[in-house]
Each structure stands twice: as structure tokens, then as C-alpha cells.
Amino acid sequence: MKRFRRHGQESQRDRLKQELFHFTKTVEHGFPHQPSALGYSASLQLMAIGTRSGAIKLYGAPGVEFMGLHDENAAVTQVFFMPHQVELVTLLDDNSLHMWTLRGHKGLSELLEIGRFMLTGPPGAPPSVTRVTAVLAHSSGELLLLGTEGGHVFIVEVPGFRELEERNISLDQVTSSVPDDYIGRRNLEHVEALQENPINSNQVAIGYGRGLIVIWDLEQRHAIRHIPATQQLESMWWTEDGSSLLSSHSDGSYCCWPLRGEDENEAEEKSDTPYGHFPCKAITNIVQLPTAGGPPFLLFSGGMPRASYGDRHCITVIHSKTQVAFDFTSRIIDFFVIRDGPQHTGEPSALVVLVEEELVVIDLQTEGWPVIQTPYLVSLHSSAITCSHHVSAIPLKLWERIIAAGELQNTHYSKKPWPITGGQNLAPDPPQRDLLLTGHEDGTVRFWDASGICLYPLYKLSTAAVFHADADPNDNMSQSAEGEWPPFRKVGCFDPYSDDPRLGIQKIHLCKYSGYLTVAGTAGQILMLELNDEAAEQTVEAKVVDLLQGQEGFRWKGHTQLDVRVESVLFPAGFQPFTVVQCHPPAVVTALTLHSEWKLVAFGTSHGFGVYDYLQKNNVLVK
């Protein structure tokens, strides 16, 4: 009988387990790990990000997200949307090409892989002949042009991935059309870039690593022009009216090549080095876009003076007399510009930059070019996460007060709506309001809306102002000095360096009914905070709790405690500290809880625990 009952209990437990762990939806929050490629479709208003682990992620309007994973464990090196279609092509670093599409299924869309392809090349050819280095998705939507390491351009029909051998552009065909004096001086190297003429889809520019640019007629199958640039080529841009080509080079210069005369094969090389006479780093990507009445926008990545600013990750924007070098804290992967108007051919409206640790979007229409706050892909780890605390079913009043405090912090953001608007979020409104609080190494606590698909930042609390830390936080990161050259402006929130490791938050507890919050840190500090809708200047009372209770002969060899400021401090609206409990010795706080009805906070470290009455500001128990 006993055995039977135990068996029944076990099956019941198993059933419970199955019920508990039956997930129907999984959402990935935060920024993708190791992004490696960026693509954008102006017609679909969708952005694609590829990663080094072979994931492909699509983002549209907030809440519209798709994800696919290549079977190959290889990095995505390039992503291209086919013009005016719902297909996109990915190139992996194993040299394979993959085609993906968005398909409707039971009223919802899903991302599916519909084909894969590997260039084979002629029998016995070395691998460099078919190693793809540049891809052009032709505006017809039916062709892919693939430039290779060996200098050839292969033409492939899509979606079937059929190689059109008779239309391929071999290196021999190109060299036979180029003057002997140019070929004699150097080999052409790999195909670095491919660009289509915006006003004549039969013409493509092929840019070779050593600098030569050849304009090829796809119908007539011959070169109609060559541009003998002498510097190592990095990227090209064909201006919208088709009148000129821009080329950027490894020495930090760019050239504008006029194309008006058909026979002007010997165009003069007029190079411009935006950042000066000293050696500069390569300009890796260049874009020029017209405006309705005024001068064009010129945007490029790189080009910084090598000796002084070689370690900076910058994108420069020049328009009329305004020039700004946007300075990012991690390496730039790629960027694109969103444009207004019908067919998205109007004024440049936003610059979207993918860097290694975050996505930054800059409003190009508002004066001062402010940053637009991102509704998704927010870098959760802008400072390393040290702990988290989830609170569900937040009362509306507390929710509104937290949002109001957050809005006061966000006045430096652009008021423009999010510019990527593709798709429609079909998810119903969340049934309740959920908060996720993350504690960080730099002493901040960030409040996130965790109710829906997107993890959205609501408010940021900094505890550093309470203490005399090793270095005071510098709030003027984004302000560039007047007349500074290059005209740097820091953008983005990724800042992995902590001024003082003792500030790190280790435990968080929020009472959703009373609005009291307690946070505890690395150096034995426990802060009690309450929500205030207005800024207030106040002193913070500090109370030391001796967990050793006078034990003889103990020597603490860890870090020292943080010194609480004696003078009054102006705290902004939001959660404001009113008392600090300092454990002695100042070891990491390992446990924390709050009882707001009794006005008690309990805490523990590896040396003991205590209970503190934060209304009377007295110790209740120390053990």
C-alpha cells in the first residue's frame, strides 16, 4: 500500500513538473551577443542583424521581432535585403549564401530559410577565385552580384541560386579593357566593393582592393569606363543623380569622381582628407545623400588621425557648416541612414549605427542631432549586471510615478518617434505591469518595463552621489569642448568601466505597496530609499552596524568602506536615499529583505546578520 501511494505521489509530482515547465513563448531581451552584420530594407522598414554565432534577427516597429539560426556554426559577415521584396540574403564566413523570407502562417509571420548556395567556380580553380568579398543585391530583385578574392564577379539568379556563367565578369575581361600602363604597375587584388548606378541599373561599379574602379555594362558585357585611383580602396558610393562616384581609402582620404563625360577615362584624382595632414586611419564606409534645397549630407566611419585618436570609434556627419564626429565606446560594425518621404527617397532623417555593444540612433532633422531612445535592443549590460530583482503586478500609481521620474532624466533625447516602423505588433496588451530591476557594477539600479515583448528602460537610479567615491561620475561626457578638433561627441550608454568597484549593487528589494526601496552593495552598504516626485536637498544619515560585536584580534583584509557625504546632497526626483546602514567589516551583502509595515530591513553578510528599524533609525538585532 505504501509503495502504491509513493508511486501515485511521484506521478503527481511529474505531472506538476510538466505543467510548471511547459513554456509557450520565449523572448530574448537585451542586445545580441557579438553582432557582425547589419542590413536595412527601406520598403519593408525592417532592420536585420547577423551575429558571430550564426543568428539572424529582424526588427521593425517596437514588438515586431523575428529570429532565425543558420545550421552552420559560422559568423554572418553580410546581410542584404532584396529590393522591394520580403527576401533577404546572408553571407557567412564559411562562404555560404543563404536566402530567408517572411511567410504568413496562421495569421502570423515567420522567418524561414528557403535556400542556400556555395560558389563552385571552374574545376581546379584555387579557393580565392570563389571566396566572396562583396555582394550587390541588384535593383531588379532577380540578380546577386558576387565579387571575390580572386577579382572575379559572379552573377547569380535568385531565388533559385542559378549561376549565370555567360554573364560572369572575369578578371581577364576587366584587365583587357584597362590601359596597359595601369595593369603593368600593380595587380588589382580582390573585389572590395560593388555599387549599382541609381539611374541606370545596367551599370555597376566594381571597386578593386588596389584602388581601380571599373564601370561595367551588364547588358553589353564590357567596361565603359575605368577610374585609376591609386590608394587602397575601402568603400564606394554612387551619388543619387548618377553624376559621380565617391571612393574612400585606407589613408583616411576620399575622392569624388565626376562621371558626366562618357570618354573622360582619365579623370583627375582629387582627394580630400577630412582630418588632416598627419597619417589617418582608413575611411571604411562612406555615404552621401542629397537634401531638398541645401548641400548634401556626407557621412563616413573612420578617418581619425592615427597617432592621436587611432583608438576612437567614430562616424562623422558633415552637413553645410556643421560637422560632428560621433564617438562610440565600442567598435563600429556598420551603419545606415533612414530617409523620409515617398519611396524613402526624401531628406535624411536618422542615422542608425550598430556597434559591438549597442545600437545608437541619431536624429538628423532636429537641431543638435540628438540621440533617439531605443525601444528595443537596449544594452542591459551598459555597466556589468551584478544582480536583479523582478516585481510583478505593480500598482498603477507607483508605475506612473516611476515613469514620471524617468521622463525627467530623458530630456536630452530626441522627441522624434522611433524611425523603424515595419510590421505590426499583434501581441495583446499585457495583463499586468511587471518591473525588472537590475543592479550594476557602477552603483546604478535600472528599472525596466518587463510586461511585454520589449524590455524598455523606465528609470535609472544612481547611488554614487551618496558617497565620496574614488572618482566622481562625469556628467559632461556628451559635451565637446568649444573649438575642439576633431569635433567629438560621446554617444551611447555602454560604459563597462566602473569608477569604484565598491559601489557595485549586490541585492535589491522593492516594496510595491509602500514605494520603499532598499539596495545593498559590495562594501557592506545598505541604502534605504523612498520615492519622491520632486528634487530634494538632504543629508543622508549613516549608521554603523558591528557584526563582529567587538571580537578581539580580527583583522579585515578586504576593501575599505565607502565614506558617506556629511554635507547635504541634491537628489533628483525619483528614489532618494534617507539612511545608510554600514556593516562592519565592509564585506559584500549576501542577503536582504524589507518589511515596510514594520519599517524593518534585514540584511546579512558572511560575518553575520542584522535587523534595522529605518523609522526610528535604530538597530533592532545584530548577530
Image (cartoon, grey):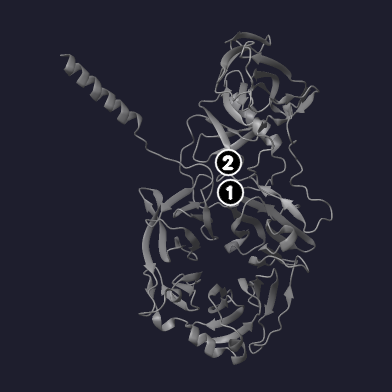
Relative height, residue 168 to residue 609 (above, below): below
Q: How far apart are marks 2 and 1 (CA)?
A: 9 Å
Q: In this view, does 260 lie above or below 450?
A: below
Left or right of 528: which side holds 487?
A: right
- Percent across and percent down for residue 187 are 56, 82
- The residue most toward the front is 553
Please indicate, yes or no, whether residue 463 appears anywhere in the rendered image.
Answer: yes
Tell me if residue 274 comes above or below residue 373 in the rendering: below
> Which residue carries the number 2 mark?
381
Residue at 49%, 72% (x, y): give it: 138
Would residue 268 appear left or right of 23 to someone viewing this image?
right
Amino acid on which the number 2 mark rests in the picture: His
Can the viewer see residue 596? Answer: no
Q: Residue furthest left?
A: 1
Which one is in front, 398 or 245?
Answer: 245
State which quadrant residue 590 falls in: top right
The residue positioned farthest toward the right in the image shown: 483
Q: Nearer the viewer, residue 549 or 178?
A: 549
Give percent across and percent down for residue 175: 53, 87
Residue 337's x, y, as percent?
62, 60
Under circle 1, the secondary element is loop
Which residue is drawn at the image coordinates 54% and 82% (left, top)? 216
User: To which residue does mark 1 refer?
Assistant: 357
Which residue is nearer to you in this view: 252 or 223?
252
Q: Nearer the viewer, residue 585 or 295?
A: 585
Contact flag, marks 2 and 1 (Cβ < 8 Å): yes
Name the image quarter holding residue 398: top right
Q: Quadrant of the C terminus?
A: top right
Residue depicted at 64% across the width and 20% down the height: 555
The amino acid type, in three-letter code, at marker 1 is: Glu
Residue 434, labelled with which disc?
none
Instruction: Judge the density around disc 2: few (<14), some (14-19), many (≥20) Cα neighbours within 10 Å.
Output: some
